């Protein structure tokens, strides 16, 4: 893989953000986590997209971040705490590739489609788990949480994603393999510790 440094680095940063910022936000204010984490992930996917000029960079970055999240399968008693976020991360990467692959054609509508796409895909996944009898955090407060997930949260996400796509510029620093490896190790350790 030609752009492995960018893919691993930005994926590891996303995994680290999920393990640190995401962990804290879910503990103190779960509704805010939904507003913040996708734009952070999108920023990192977008940086990889801009640096590599590859339309597939977002899903590759998402795969690295999801893999880091899945390390928790070795340490947590409830598999959903690792699998559910990993599924969400992968869906985010897929829908960014589908709707925002062309870096010159980012529009609010495309950002909205990417945001709603992954959210509806994730809800579908959760409905399967719900019908199988699993208790899920999103449904604990009733349908108001679900409604917020697909309305307010999605709209705020789409706006933040559009802002990032429109106004962020390509980071130009050189990625050394040692920095990439260290970032990946820190992300895995943070995931296990948190």
Image (tube, grey):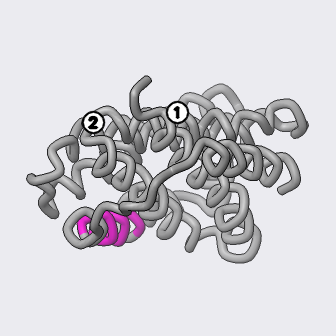
Residue 23 vs 139, above or below: the answer is below
- Among the 4 quarters of the image, the one containing residue 94: top left
Of 45 and 120, which appears nearest the observer? 45
Task: State the residue at coordinates (30%, 68%).
Answer: 164
Regarding residue 153, the answer to whether it shows in the image is: yes
Q: Residue 12 appears at what percent x and percent y? A: 61, 47
Label 1's element? helix
- Describe residue 10's horizontal placement relative to residue 21 as left or right: left
Q: CA distance from mark 1 to mark 2?
A: 15 Å
Q: Which mark is residue 164?
A: none
Of 20 and 158, which appears nearest the observer? 20
Q: Which residue is mark 1?
A: 63
Q: Which mark is residue 54?
A: 2
Viewport quadrant of the N terminus? top left
Residue 124 vs 22, above or below: the answer is above
Residue 146 is inside the magenta segment: no
Task: State the residue at coordinates (28%, 38%).
Answer: 97
Viewport quadrant of the C terminus? bottom right
Regarding residue 147, the answer to whether it shows in the image is: no
Q: Earlier in the sequence, mark 1 or mark 2?
A: 2
Task: State the residue at coordinates (23%, 57%).
Answer: 112
Q: Residue 70 appears at what percent x and percent y? A: 71, 34
Label 2's element? loop
Q: Residue 19 appears at what percent x and percent y? A: 71, 56
Residue 43 vs 72, above or below: the answer is below
- Among the 4 quarters of the image, the one containing residue 58: top left
Q: Which residues are magenta?
A: 153-162
- Describe residue 89's horizontal placement relative to residue 155 as left or right: right
Residue 158 is inside the magenta segment: yes
Residue 96 vs 83, above or below: the answer is below
Of 124 and 63, which appears nearest the observer? 63
Of 69 and 32, which appears nearest the observer? 69
């Amino acid at each position: 893989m030609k752009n492995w440094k960018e893919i691993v680095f930005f994926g590891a940063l996303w995994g680290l953000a999920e393990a640190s910022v995401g962990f804290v936000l879910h503990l103190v204010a779960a509704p805010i986590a939904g507003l913040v984490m996708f734009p952070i992930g999108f920023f990192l996917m977008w940086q990889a997209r801009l640096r590599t000029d590859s339309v597939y960079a977002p899903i590759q970055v998402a795969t690295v971040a999801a893999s880091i999240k899945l390390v928790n399968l070795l340490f947590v008693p409830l598999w959903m705490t690792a699998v559910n976020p990993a599924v969400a991360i992968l869906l985010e990467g897929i829908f960014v590739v589908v709707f925002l692959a062309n870096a010159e054609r980012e529009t609010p509508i495309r950002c909205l489609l990417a945001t709603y796409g992954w959210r509806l895909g994730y809800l579908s996944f959760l409905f399967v788990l719900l019908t199988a009898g699993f208790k899920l955090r999103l449904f604990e407060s009733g349908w108001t949480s679900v409604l917020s997930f697909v309305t307010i949260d999605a709209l705020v996400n789409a706006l933040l994603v559009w802002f990032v796509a429109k106004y962020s510029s390509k980071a130009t620093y050189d990625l050394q393999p040692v920095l990439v490896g260290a970032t990946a190790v820190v992300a895995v350790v943070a995931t296990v510790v948190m």
